[in-house]
């Protein structure tokens, strides 16, 4: 589970997770078009540019305006290179690629964890170790904040969020406590919510993980509609990638990784009929080929960067379309 995200920048002590592994998985080559769908601190993008001598088109997408400001700084620092920052959620991949790379792209990287820039700024409201407004929006200019949800949803809806997105076994107990507490005034800060949850669950009792961890994760996912966004970008990646293009995804908790794993398994299968069906009737044509086994950080990386410990990377390659495959087979 993503306890409080991961570090994604190599400046000011920040470290990009699975840096070399992720860039290598993209199969970088000069003249290619690559999408960093979660630019963050720019660690992966910078390394990708270094690996190719800057001779690529890099589309840098992020929902966070601060991350896009960093992408623009990167572009300014590398004049003459084709770096295109785009302020958007990665769920908008199809639209962005349609505008900037209508012929398709050679690689898509999604690093689904939080950046240290987000975690370490109290005003963003992601981390309960700082006292700040209960926000949690990747794009703080759009949509309801975590405070809006906490102070408006009823017990059932709050409990469902905490259970579904945080696997919080005490979800209903926490939800009831939130609704009862806000009768005397809104819950507006990270420390107020974390303290309320800790009190509701009887304190930490020597546990290393704070009792509010799962609830904060759940609220963040709900606020940013993260799983819906992931489902959409996975589907769109099939249409955006060129044949031979790579899809590289780093996940940090089980909900996301399960979605990625199932998607890649389904799209690489020759049959998706129910297992108990004796005869295949689906006529499913695989569009992906899974590359290697899931990749996790090594012992050294986890020691240097404990936030990387929950990372898992999956890789798939876009197969040629059926008509192209038929022609290739006929030619051979």
Image (spheres, grey):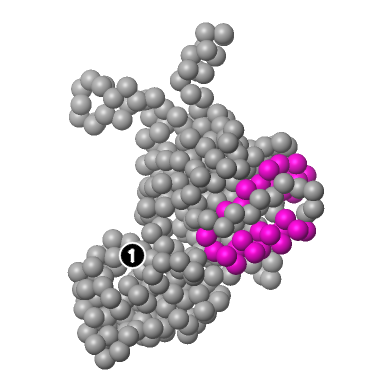
Q: Quadrant of residue 164?
A: bottom left
Question: Residue visible at 69% across and 71% down?
Answer: 12
Q: Quadrant of the C terminus?
A: top right
Part of the protein shown in magenta: 48-77
| Residue at the image position 46 percent from the left and 32 percent from the top | 288
User: Does the stretch in magenta take in 287?
Assistant: no
- Depth check: 145 or 278 in front? 145
Numbered label tally: 1
Residue on which the image places disc 1: 166
Is residue 148 rendered to the left or right of residue 327? left
Q: Position of residue 219 (x, y in %)?
A: 36, 68
Q: Which residue extends farthest front? A: 99
Magenta stretch: residue 50 in it?
yes
Tell whether 280 sits left or right of 48: left
Residue 187 seen in this snapshot: yes
Indicate whether 276 appears above or below 312: above
State the residue at coordinates (57%, 65%): 65
Quarter containing the N terminus? bottom left
Secondary structure under the numbered disc 1 in the rendered image: helix
Give whichever of 13, 143 is nearer the camera.
143
Write the residue at 45% across / 29% down. Answer: 287
Residue 294 point in image, percent of width and height: 48, 44
Q: Residues within 10 Å of mark 1 (few under 14, many from 20)?
A: many
């Amino acid at each position: 589970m993503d306890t409080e995200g991961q570090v994604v920048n190599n400046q000011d002590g920040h470290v990009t997770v699975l840096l070399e592994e992720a860039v290598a998985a993209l199969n970088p080559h000069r003249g290619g078009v690559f999408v960093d769908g979660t630019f963050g601190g720019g660690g992966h993008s910078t390394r990708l540019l270094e690996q190719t001598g800057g001779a690529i088109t890099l589309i840098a997408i992020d929902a966070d305006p601060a991350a896009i400001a960093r992408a623009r700084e990167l572009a300014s620092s590398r004049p003459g290179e084709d770096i295109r920052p785009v302020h958007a959620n990665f769920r908008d991949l199809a639209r962005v690629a349609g505008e900037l790379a209508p012929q398709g792209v050679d690689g898509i990287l999604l690093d689904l964890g939080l950046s240290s820039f987000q975690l370490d700024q109290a005003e963003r409201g992601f981390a309960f170790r700082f006292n700040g407004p209960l926000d949690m929006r990747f794009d703080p200019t759009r949509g309801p904040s975590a405070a809006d949800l906490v102070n408006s949803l009823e017990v059932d809806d709050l409990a469902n969020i905490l259970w579904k997105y945080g696997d919080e076994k005490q979800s209903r107990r926490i939800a009831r406590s939130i609704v009862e507490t806000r009768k005397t005034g809104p819950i507006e800060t990270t420390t107020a919510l974390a303290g309320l949850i800790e009190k509701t669950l009887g304190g930490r009792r020597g546990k290393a993980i704070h009792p509010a961890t799962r609830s904060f994760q759940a609220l963040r996912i709900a606020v940013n509609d993260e799983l819906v966004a992931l489902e959409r970008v996975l589907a769109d990646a099939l249409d955006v990638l060129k044949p031979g293009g790579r899809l590289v995804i780093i996940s940090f908790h089980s909900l996301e990784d399960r979605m990625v794993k199932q998607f890649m398994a389904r799209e690489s299968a020759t049959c998706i009929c129910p297992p108990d069906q004796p005869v295949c009737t689906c006529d499913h044509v695989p569009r992906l080929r899974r590359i290697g086994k899931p990749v996790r950080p090594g012992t050294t990386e986890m020691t240097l960067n404990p936030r990387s410990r929950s990372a898992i990377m999956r890789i798939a390659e876009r197969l040629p379309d059926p008509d192209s495959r038929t022609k290739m087979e006929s030619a051979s």
